[in-house]
Amino acid sequence: MSVLVGKKAPLFEAEAVINGGEFTEKFTLEQYIGKKYVIFFFYPLDFTFVCPTEILAFQEQLEAFEKRGVMVVGCSVDSKFSHWAWLNTEKKDGGIKGVTFPLVSDLSKTISENYDVLAGEYDYNEDGEAEFDGAPVAYRGLFLIDKQGVVRHQVVNDLPLGRSVKEALRMVDALQFFEENGEVCPADWHAGDEGMAATQEGVSDYLARH
């Protein structure tokens, strides 16, 4: 599994569904560089069980992300048509109607491969036939990308393990606190807590006060 933290986020151009039901053929993350932070997350498949709970949880917190200048973008290996159908299915029927942030189609699985979250890989058997070893879907990867297009935080969960949207929001707060104050964030830091100077003296002073 690659560690992308500190590196430029892999860029791409792909089909996507935006604004809850509009198709776009050339969606990119590059459009946000210099303008917004990005939470870019992968999920395994549309019309499944854990995935809608995460996507709806992101939608519920979307205003909080937007207030912080963060664009939320989801991605799976489904087609844009599958995304569109899911976005137009009522929640009571397993859909995600009402979700407005972009859902990217990674039908070729190249975006998942570039972010190293594909839950398997292609190989050849002894007869020279191509086979896929593992699950041909993405793990639950999440990447916090800053305004310069650099990955500052990543977490990858196995397929059965849903993520904490509140934790993603906390990491945005921590990054922005560091950028604004030059102080680092200790364990379990939350917005409103004190930071500490990134020096031995600063650490000692912080620990003395706690």
Image (spheres, rainbow, N blue to C red):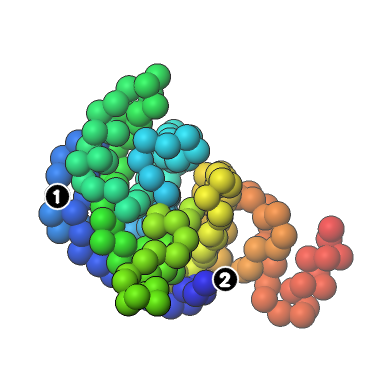
Q: How many marks?
A: 2
Q: Horizontal and vertical percent for residue 20?
A: 24, 36
Which of disc 1 and disc 2 is earlier in sequence? Answer: 1
As displayed, is residue 136 above or below residue 101?
below
Mark 2 residue type: Gly
130 left or right, relative to 2: left
Q: Nearer the viewer, residue 139 or 147?
A: 139
As displayed, is residue 31 above or below residue 102?
below
Q: Visible in this render: residue 148? A: no
Q: Nearer the viewer, residue 100 or 110?
A: 110
Mark 1 residue type: Thr
Q: Horizontal and vertical percent for residue 195?
A: 67, 62
- Tag 1, which secondary structure? strand
Residue under circle 2?
Answer: 182
C-alpha distance separating marks 2 and 1: 39 Å
- Tag 2, which secondary structure? loop
Residue under circle 1?
Answer: 24
At x 42%, y 37%, the residue is: 48
133 left or right, relative to 114: right
At x 45%, y 65%, the residue is: 133
Q: Horizontal and vertical percent for residue 162?
A: 55, 44
Tell me if mark 1 has few (under 14), some (14-19) or many (20+) residues whose alpha carbon lies within 10 angstroms of its own.
some
At x 67%, y 76%, the residue is: 198
Examine the image and state in which quarter residue 174 appears: bottom right
